[in-house]
Image (cartoon, rainbow, N blue to C red):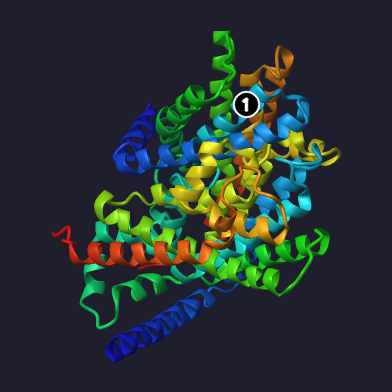
Amino acid sequence: MADRVARVAWDLRAFTILAGMWVRVGWSYRTSFVVLTLSSLVITGVDFVAIVIMFANVDALGGFGLGEIGFLYGATAVCLGLADLAVGNVERLGRRVRLGTFDAMMVRPVGVFAQMCADEFAFRRVGRIAQGAAVLAWSLSVVHVDWGPARLAMLGSMLVCGAAIFLGLFVLGATFQFVSGDASEVANAFTYGGNTMTQYPLTIYPTEVVKALTFLVPVAFVNWYPALFILDVPDPFGLPGWLRFAAPVVALVLCTLAALAWRTGVRHYRSTGS
Amino acid sequence: MLYVAVALSSFRRYSTYTAATLAGIFTNSVFGVIISFSYIAVWKENPHAGGYDVTDALTYCWLAQAMIMTIAIWNGGTTDDVAERIRTGDVAIDLYRPVSFLGWFLAGDLGRAAYHLLTRGVAPTIVGALLFHLHFPTSPLTYLAFLVSVALGVVVSFSIRMLVASSSFWLLDQTGLLTLSSVFAMFFSGLVVPLVLFPEPFRSVVLALPWSAFVQVPIDIWLGQRHGAAVLGGLAFQAGWGAVLLLGCSGVLRLADRRVVVQGG
């Protein structure tokens, strides 16, 4: 156990050092670094501007107003942003396997996972978190919420568990590339696709889709079920009420699955050779 | 003739990435479905938003997905080679070749676009047509005008990407500008939200910008929102921006040719 803790600590330290190195690399092209961080902020904000433009034509989408949609949007953006900042680079796995550079990582005295995450660490990704947080803060100033300790706790848990759910999806998607080769776009359909889906109230989707987002690719737990609790909205699909509190369990299960899949993938990895 | 050969070899070069193409088709289709539901929600509330009905809107959604790689809205294409060659200094060789620098890379980009149109354009459109009710033109002339419009869209997109790539002559690292230009392209092409939904006066402004040649103009031709003289007007609009921007490119290249000391040994 102590061994394990020491190992995780060692990997975390390595991650920080490597990530810091990449931040300094980025900073050496200063103009680009600043433009990149700013444009990351803008590029993710474009989705929300699109929703605002839609609201120039309508008063509500799926029975939800702009304020509530801002809440859903901001929450999923912050969660995805946090996961993306920490582990987003694992999606490069396919390319590394194809080029054979993954092999070099396996012989270094640091966990492969920590190396993958830190590799070409992109500081600009804080742009997405900042933009999502801004929309979330704005939405909280518009929607009426009856704040109490339970709702505040749910807000915190939503951000942590939501980030963990996306983290699990990123890693599972990357692991899939051990089998599929360089097909990172398939993983994007689940991570960024899940994010795009949860930007809207799930009432705009058919019931089967909502069930799939609950039980199959559980992105509904990132923001939808917690939002039903925080905004005090009855479930439009009549699904069980305890789903509102299930996000921590879902996050735990998904991350465990991802860790197992990653370990299996690395164990069975055979170099493409040359 | 030389340019046809360049286009063909570029077509073949891109056609070797089969797995990536299949993965891309899958992802475009997933996003097509997601966006379709959001458009259905909009047009359910307001059945005539932007002068479209819900069928037009869904058709717009799937054609826009089909256009992403063809037009290279998120950048990429042969202009990435240009930027890389500027960074390494190899561009010095290209500039002294006895063929037009712009013509060479434009031909390559058109070959790439043709490959992406046939794969990542056609396939998601079929998926969309299987899942939703879409609008298909009845006149062969409309299809022809649409294809010409897409080709002109590629030319406009190529010139903007080429201008960004040329910035490497001065900035060395183009990634910042590249990201910024893809934000503009995504938003002002009508990829994330149809330009017809923009409230006035923004609507008139965005429709006059070159990026509307990427997605909005070709799709309006397909939908029959532009017909008769308006079709020619749309094509002329695209051709005009294409000509202006290509001239801009050749100006920048001439400047770079004179002023810049190329890196490398």
**Residue sitting at 73 percent across and 58 percent down?**
A231
**Residue sitting at 74 percent across and 41 percent down?**
A63
Quarter of the N terminus of chain B within the rendering? top left
Whether residue B80 is visible, yes or no, is yes
Q: Position of residue B231 (x, y in %)?
A: 68, 18
Question: In the drawing, does residue B109 fall left or right of residue A146?
Answer: left
Q: Callout 1 environment at 10 Å: few (<14), some (14 to 19), or many (20+)? A: many
- Does dot 1 land on a helix, a strand or a loop? helix
In this view of the protein, which residue sits in the foreground, B138 or B94? B138
**Residue sitting at 69 percent across and 50 percent down?**
A234
Relative height, residue B59 to residue B259 (above, below): above
Return the residue found at the far left.
A274
Give the mark count: 1
Question: In the drawing, does residue A168 fall left or right of residue A26?
Answer: left
In this view of the protein, which residue sits in the foreground, B15 or A263? A263
Q: Which residue is mark 1?
A: B219
Picture quarter containing residue B186? top right
Question: In the drawing, does residue A223 fall left or right of residue B201?
Answer: left
Q: Amino acid at mark 1?
A: Ile
In this view of the protein, which residue sits in the foreground, B204 or A267? A267
Relative height, residue A86 to residue B152 (above, below): below
Return the residue found at the far right.
B201
Q: Position of residue B107 (x, y in %)?
A: 44, 35
What's the chain of the residue with tag 1?
A: B
Whether residue B88 is visible, yes or no, is no
Q: Position of residue B152 (x, y in %)?
A: 58, 29
In this view of the protein, which residue sits in the foreground, A260 or A135? A260
Picture quarter containing residue B203? top right
Quarter of the C terminus of chain B within the rendering? bottom left
Q: Position of residue A84 (x, y in %)?
A: 50, 65
**Residue sitting at 54 percent across and 77 percent down?**
A27
Return the residue found at the far top.
B139
